[in-house]
Structure formats: structure tokens, C-alpha cells
Image (cartoon, helix red, strand yellow):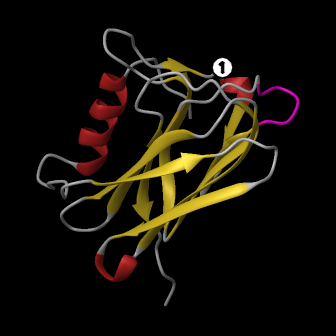
Amino acid sequence: MAAPSGGWWAALLLVVALRPAEAVSEPMTVAFDVRPGGVVHSFSQNVGPGDKFTCMFTYASQGGTNEQWQMSLGTSEDHQHFTCTIWRPQGKSYLYFTQFQAEVRGAEIEYAMAYSKAAFERESDVPLKTEEFEVTKTAVSHRPGAFKAELSKLVIVAKAAHSEL
């Protein structure tokens, strides 16, 4: 499920996934601290009517001091798709991540990508190697033994889960 480098690819995929007729709601962006210390931490936000969708970022990291990160969520006008982007606005994180997982609830992942470095000023996103992370229907997470501990951005595009009658 990996894709070529660059934010333009994610934007193009988002446009295709949301179809031209469906507008995207104004994204909601929330700042949070990523804290080192080797302890597992989680941060989550809900979006959509009745908080239909949830994006939860769970991680453990070492080294340095707290870093301010952001989580942005947006939905399509018909509330059938949503995006969750988790990133460090300053580009590269200096923390050593021992694990990470971004999980969605209320939807299934159609596209996900993890980056060791987020775009900042004139620099581009640098994706993780596909062997460093895995994508399931509801989560993108590190692959134990292959993940090289560098993480600065996660992007998820998900479609509303079908409810069985």
C-alpha cells in the first residue's frame, strides 16, 4: 500500500479517493506533545457527524525532549471518507521511536504512508521503506525488527466502514 515520495502523491490520491464531486470539510488540526521516555503514549481525535471517525496515534520513543506534533483530520462532504495526518511540523523528528501505530475507527484504510522526514521549507517528505511498516484495514504500524526508529509523519485516507444489516 506504499506510494511514491512527496505530498503531491497523497494529495492526488486524496482527490481521486474523494471524487471531484465531493468536497472536503475544513480540516481540524490539534497540537499535542510526543514525549520520550520509552513509555507507551496515545493521542486520539474524533471527526465527522456524531464523531463518526476516530484516529488514534500510539507510540513509544526515547531520547531528547518533548516535541510538538500535530494531528489533522478532515472528512468528505458526504462523510464517507476521512483523512488523518499525524506529523511534526518542523520536519524531522529527533526522537528514536521504538514503536508506532496509527489506528482508525469507523472506517477502513484505503491509503496509508509513513515518513521518516516530513516536508519542511524546501525539503520533501521522505517515506519509510515499505519493509519498515505494515498497513491493515484499520492501522498502519511499525514492523518489529525492520523499523529503523525514524518517524516524522503518517498519512491515512480511509473510507467509512460498511455496516451489516
* Kind of residue at disc 1: Lys
Compared with residue 81, is residue 101 higher up or lower down, i.e. above or below?
A: above
Residue in view at x 34 percent, y 59 percent: 81
* Foreground pick, 32 / 165: 32
Q: Examine the residues drawn in magenta and state their main secondary structure.
A: loop
Could one spot residue 85 in this view of the protein? no
Q: Is residue 144 magenta?
A: yes
Residue appearing at x 36%, y 32% in the figure: 10
- Residue at image coords 46%, 24%: 118
| Side (left or right) of 132 relative to 111 | right
Q: Is residue 135 left or right of residue 29?
A: right
Q: Is residue 138 above or below residue 161?
A: above
Magenta segment boundaries in residue numbering: 143-147
Q: Position of residue 137 (x, y in %)?
A: 60, 55
71 or 55, nearer to the observer: 71
Residue 140 drawn at (x, y percent): 63, 45
The quarter in which the N terminus is drawn is: top right
80 sits to left or right of 39:
left
**Residue at image mark 1:** 129
Vertical side of 131 occupied by 153: above or below:
below
